[in-house]
Image (cartoon, rainbow, N blue to C red):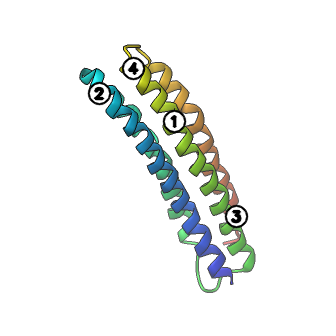
Amino acid sequence: MEFVLAAIGLGLMFGLSGAGSSIGVVIGGNSMIGALRKRPEIFGTVFVLSALPATIGLYGFVAFILFNSLVSAHMTLFAGAVIFGAGVGMGVVNLFCGIKMGQVCASGISSMGMGHNAFAQTLLSAALPEFYAILGLVCAIMMRGLIPV
């Protein structure tokens, strides 16, 4: 039971983070294609913005690496529950952060496609959902400290 809880937690940790990240990248990428039809010269800047949500998936991967070493056939129920909780918490936070970051970036990309210089404003706005993804990683790391080694 403990091992199953931990394995599900690990799966949710990186799976939901990756899903949110990939959905966010697609949202930004769709907007990028539209903006480039009007202004092909902005490719470099809008490409950076459309790729920003990819960072969310990295946090899930880092947490997976940190927790994976704690999973064993001889772990306690408490350790399994902590890993499950960290996986659910971080996974859900990162799912929404990735999607919302993609939407923020898409709005900025659309604005740039209309001729506005919105790169810096979009970059700063995208940092807000990123902050909560970082908090999710920090909370997961703090939860890791609850497990006696």
Amino acid on which disc 1 is placed: Gln
Q: Which residue is mark 3?
A: 85
| Percent position of residue 11, x then y | 55, 68
Q: Earlier in the sequence, mark 2 or mark 4?
A: 2
Q: Is residue 34 left or right of residue 104?
A: left
| Dots 2, 4 in contact, CB < 8 A | no
Is 111 above or below relative to 23?
Answer: above
Identify the residue at image location x=36%, y=21%. 113
Query: Hey, which residue is sitting farthest top in the picture?
Result: 116
Q: Earlier in the sequence, mark 1 or mark 4?
A: 1
Task: Please tell me how crowded label 2 is: few (under 14), some (14-19), or many (20+) other residues with Cα within 10 Å.
Answer: some
Q: Earlier in the sequence, mark 1 or mark 3?
A: 3
Amino acid on which disc 3 is placed: Gly
- Gap between marks 2 and 4, in whole Å? 9 Å
Q: Which residue is mark 2?
A: 36
| Percent position of residue 66, x then y | 54, 62
Nearer the observer, 106 or 49: 106
Amino acid on which disc 2 is placed: Leu
Disc nearest the viewer among 1 and 3: 1
- Gap between marks 4 and 3, in whole Å? 40 Å
Identify the residue at image location x=48%, y=24%. 122
- Gap between marks 1 and 4, in whole Å? 14 Å
| Dots 1, 3 in contact, CB < 8 A | no
Q: Earlier in the sequence, mark 4 or mark 3?
A: 3
| Percent position of residue 141, x then y | 63, 56
Quadrant the N terminus occupies: bottom right
Name the element at disc 1.
helix
Point out which mark residue 112 bears: 4
Is 29 above or below relative to 14?
Answer: above
Name the element at disc 2.
helix
Quadrant the C terminus occupies: bottom right
